[in-house]
Amino acid sequence: MAEHSVNFGKTISKLLEEKKYQTLKDVLITMNGADIAAMFEDLDEDRTPLLFRLLPKELAAETFTELGPELQEHLISGFSDRELREVVSELYVDDAADLVEEMPAGVVKRILAQADPEMRKEINEILRYPENSAGSIMTTEYVSLRPSMTVAEAITRIRRTGVDKETIYTCYVTEERKILGTVSVKDLLLTIDDDTPVSEIMDENVIFVTTLTDQEEVAQMLSKYNFLALPVVDNDQRMVGIVTFDDAMDVLVEETTEDIEKMAGMLPSEKTYLRSSPFDLFKHRIPWLMLLMVSATFTGMIITGFENKLAAQVVLTAFIPMLMDTGGNSGSQASVTVIRALSLGELELNDLPGVVWKEIQTAVLCGVALASLCFCKIMLFDRMLLGNSSITVMTAATVCFTMALTVLIAKMVGCILPMLAKRIGFDPAVMASPFITTIVDALSLLVYFAIASALLFPK
Amino acid sequence: MAEHSVNFGKTISKLLEEKKYQTLKDVLITMNGADIAAMFEDLDEDRTPLLFRLLPKELAAETFTELGPELQEHLISGFSDRELREVVSELYVDDAADLVEEMPAGVVKRILAQADPEMRKEINEILRYPENSAGSIMTTEYVSLRPSMTVAEAITRIRRTGVDKETIYTCYVTEERKILGTVSVKDLLLTIDDDTPVSEIMDENVIFVTTLTDQEEVAQMLSKYNFLALPVVDNDQRMVGIVTFDDAMDVLVEETTEDIEKMAGMLPSEKTYLRSSPFDLFKHRIPWLMLLMVSATFTGMIITGFENKLAAQVVLTAFIPMLMDTGGNSGSQASVTVIRALSLGELELNDLPGVVWKEIQTAVLCGVALASLCFCKIMLFDRMLLGNSSITVMTAATVCFTMALTVLIAKMVGCILPMLAKRIGFDPAVMASPFITTIVDALSLLVYFAIASALLFPK
């Protein structure tokens, strides 16, 4: 898709150079806002204002919403006040609020000055809510109906007021801003008798969220119920807005990216990779790297404590990386599975005993399989093929026992830590590979040296 | 949410024991299909058929669709043919096709026998398409309009035929099954003149997918364009169905889970964690564990080759885990970032040089910071505080040079491998932490021993 739009960008550039504005206009209006925005991002920044002015009002607003903040700022800086007013008045309130949140103070002042008073009030309302809450991603524009309206009246109302609403398909039946029920346009259209009151066909089982509900929970609810929108109520149970499915899809993608970043030992970033400078990347990556490096002091101390015996049996050192990696991999398999299940709501905290028991059984199967393979590998490959005669059956046994025990420990640490983190209110995603690996490393070395002491250095 | 439904399950169980069927019915009809299904999953399996029979037809179908395959099979086995027919006739075609795909052959036979001929034909059509293609997740029920219809005629048609359609909000204007344009119900309702022909208000810029388009691409397109549905066409460009946003959201979640599983070195599984047996988990986890364990042979061989020098300077061994872990963590930060950006379409293959250059700069920043911290830690903590006099400035320098170089190598391997994998048609997600760690381990040991040879064992 993106490659296609890059090539398309060349055509546009060419038309622009040749000043074929009518052709450009004809081409642009066949395109979708999201595609035009993608093309703009690839173009020379200085060419975008001219192109943007060729777009009809609605398409311009649609395109503007899809642009990155840098380009939005660049365009706004070139707008006259009248142009800015035109664009802002076409934006949906939630998109306008997003814009205000991302622009520097000077630009925000200009935007708010050009917004009409009603919109300014609504933008300010949305901005009051904490980041990542339902309030911060909702839109205040929705269709509300009275319970006493007939189906015909309801349809008339939608036709009269719907033009500014992000979705008209779910309507909310309210009285003094309390939600009594929901009616879909489908229900309205499919009701044969036009005189039926809305209260008779509305669904009274209203599922709603509050302004402070976490956006990830909102997205998961929308996805679970397959709704187009969810109503948002304030502390007094009064309806203040709706969250629509398209914003929920964006939230799902964003929150997953955050989880993945945390799982790889990074601080989550809101910028895309291409927009992040090396220094941005550095800032997000270095804290965990430093923390984990310093925690590796423990593994170093464990090895130092065993130094003399290691000097006598240097062959043991050769197996340290394999044991540590296998432990780390086993642990992160368990932790990542559990973290994902927790974040999808498939696992609850009270499932912990069941999870631990399942991981123990899995670990036994994995441990036995790995230890057997490892034993064969050591005896056949390392000892016979490579002719490393310092490897004895006892050495192989030491490594394989350690292997099996390490896998068991790793799987248990891997499943328990994320659930404990959740229990004490931490984000389980932090308890993924890097963290688990560091702990498992230390434990596996302790096991290794304990078994080696028993089998290879009997008193 | 889930906890809430568990408690609610107790109330239901109690009412069931007391045989208060009317109360149960009254309670159930206030609930949503997804919630009833969640409650059923927590209940004793044998109680579900009785409860299910209390549900009104439409709610029963909605609930049935949301159930897991085990419980669906259990319910079907208790249905009379008439009951089965009633449920099947209420299902949307795509849900019916999903059901047929998941049930054992005997059950499928019964289902198809009870489906009416039209539905049977459509189910079979959907099942013809390859797994994970747009064809396999589409539904064949959509609203089609003729270009010559007026707005009033279009609305009448929707009101007459809409009841069975999963979405009526996007209508497709077709002629001999070729798509000419799309019209939303919003456009229809907001057009003031009822006599306007549909062809005048339709959007001719139709974005569509083919039956073979990958489901992940379909989901990303729906999310990008914020559409409720995307039309699916066959090889002859004839419209055969639509994919709706709710299925797209499910696909996004599933595909991300798959990516995360692959990134943690597991084969992706379609079963949820709680439904997977330890043997299932074992089967999905052991292949990578074995492969990675065997590849650790290289690191072992590298250490063995350096054995004599290590025996002379055992203190070097103590830093191996720290160097390997830091390398592994640095590499997986880069690889996971790149993999995610690739899967979100933020990065293209031709961005590779830019990505490598950015990672080099980031690596230099991280490497210098880590090496400096590491030097202080070794000299102040390991040497002075722990009094380990075998650590010299040269030892610390060896470790810190290695550290900086390892980070550089790790970040480069981490960003290049996923992009190469994509280039040759592999899934980049496989090139994540476990794989990168194994490669970086070997490289970091080679660097370590090379630097140690130069600084500590001059000829």
Image (cartoon, coloured by chain):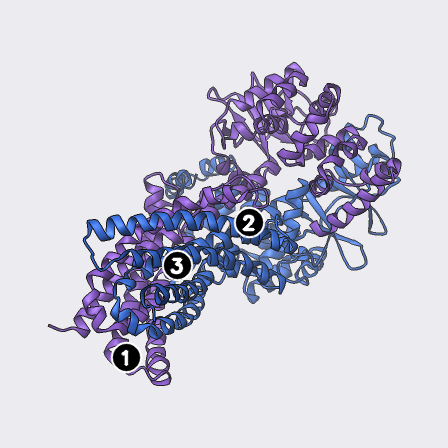
Chain colours: A blue, B purple
Q: Is residue A333 left or right of residue A176?
A: left
Residue B391 disc label: 1
Q: Check disc 2 and report its element: helix, strand or loop.
A: helix
Residue at figure coordinates x 68%, y 35% from the top left: B186
Q: Check disc 1 and report its element: helix, strand or loop.
A: loop
Give x and y (percent) for residue A346: 61, 48
Disc 3 or disc 1, which is closer to the eye? 3
Three-letter code, disc 3: Thr
Three-letter code, disc 2: Lys
Residue at figure coordinates x 42%, y 40% from the top left: A5
What is the spatial separation of the Cα atoms under label 3 and label 1, in whole angstroms? 29 Å
What is the spatial separation of the Cα atoms under label 2 and label 3, in whole angstroms? 21 Å
Chain bearing tag 1 is B
The residue indicated by pointer 2 is: A358
Residue B1 can be seen, yes or no: no
The residue indicated by pointer 3 is: A402
Q: Residues within 10 Å of mark 3 (few under 14, many from 20)?
A: many
